[in-house]
Amino acid sequence: MNTIPPLQPSLPYSLQTRLLSTVLALLALAWVLAATLTWRDAHHEVSELLDAHLAQTAALLLLQPLEEIKDEEFNLAPDLHKYQQRVVFQVWHDGRLLARSASAPSEPLAPRKQAGFTDSEAGGQSWRVFGTPGHSGMWLQVGELQTSRHDVVMVSLYSMIWPMVLALPLLALGIWWAVRGAVQPLRHLGQTVAARQPQSLAPLETTGVVPEVLPLVTAVNQLFERMGHLLAAEQQFTADASHELRTPIAAIRMQAQVAQGASHSSERNQALAATIHGCDRATRLIEQLLQLARLDAESAYTNTPSTDLADVSHAVAHDLLDAAQMRSQDVVLDIAGPTPVTLAEPLAQVLLRNLLDNALRYSPDGAQVRVQIGPSPEGRVQLCVQDSGPGLEPAAMERLGERFFRVPGTGQTGSGLGWSIVQRIARLYGLWVEHDRSPLLGGLRVRITWP
């Protein structure tokens, strides 16, 4: 069966082609408009000049003794020049033609007794006629062929237009050369970028770049800078992650070897329990690494819906309730009511889970953790998580948010990524994060305020 090949999408025109097409089209339009206006003005001026010539000819004839021409004698003026045939005159008296040019028709050039200028037909030709009365009832008509006027107009127009016609190709060539030179910096920039090595993120040279291209070069350099920071962060992240994953994997392997070589069931069960604990720790570390990688992409949540922070707080507290009860810890929710915020629900859960889990993890047995959601003194939505733990020293508090940083001496396992995730979400959504010592419970207090 024959198949119809798909239509290939048309390629966009180059910038040089579009500029040339636009400029040349505007040039042609302006040239046609100028030629039209020139023809109109030339036709008007030539008509005015030739009309004045007819009137002047009639005035000169009126100075002649026309009344001496006898009716019984017909006078025929000779043609003394080849162009004289285009301008003729007639002398009428009482309806009789007394005198005329040799090339003038015998019939009236225009209706008799009609003074001034008239366009008429006589002798099978079109005429421009000026009629005026003379002495003793004489009537004088001076006419010029319309074709003669047209020829004069065309000659005048030709003398003005032909230099423009000859200049058009030169002007088009000059425009092409100018446009080609104008887009040369873009072509050079494209060649420079194409010749770079894939791993090269060095900024492009800005010396000598034209002002129109400089914003593009600056934007590309800024992109290279962001990519450099991103790649450096990813390399550091990969190195740190591999180092952090090596520890739980080594512990799991060691406990598995202990279980394998155990001779008593109690020893084996203890090793297997430690293995499961190591697997849980590695799983949590991997989950946090994936969460942080999605946040670094900044594209997981482009359309941000409204989320009820109160509902999310109840759900997260319920998930962590069993772990808190195992250590006799008390989780208190102080929530005034529904609190909608601009934050995707999965990220709201991640935010609250990391804050509440850190508070429970680093607080002693029997401690209290309080979650408060309500308006800040400025009237904005604020989330506050505080605990009755030992708190943090100023030096350790300054390092909060560093990836894989863990407070020494706590005796708790962790990946050191919880605070990094919290601060990454805050930067992504423009949230304001504060941490200090809780005046109510004495431990760490974390306040997050929505814009």
Image: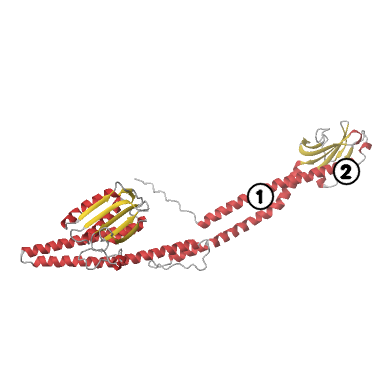
Q: Quadrant of residue 202?
A: bottom left
Whole-number angstrom distance, CA of label 2 to CA of label 1:
38 Å
Instruction: Check disc 1 and report the residue beneath it.
Output: 34
Identify the secondary structure beneath mark 2.
helix
Q: Is residue 443 left or right of residue 427?
A: left
Kind of residue at badge 2? Leu
Kind of residue at badge 1? Ala
Give the mark, 2 or 1, whose residue is nearer the N terminus: 1
Q: Position of residue 331 (x, y in %)?
A: 22, 54
Is there any visible trace of residue 214 in the rendered image?
A: yes
Image position of 336 with respect to 238: above or below: above
Identify the secondary structure beneath mark 1.
helix
Residue nearest the observer in this picture, 29 or 305? 305
Instruction: Check disc 2 and report the residue beneath it.
Output: 60
Residue nearest the observer in this picture, 149 or 48? 48
Q: Is residue 176 left or right of residue 420?
A: right
Q: Quadrant of residue 409?
A: bottom left
Q: Position of residue 275 (x, y in %)?
A: 15, 63
Mark 1: give few (<14), some (14-19) or many (20+) Cα within 10 Å. Answer: few
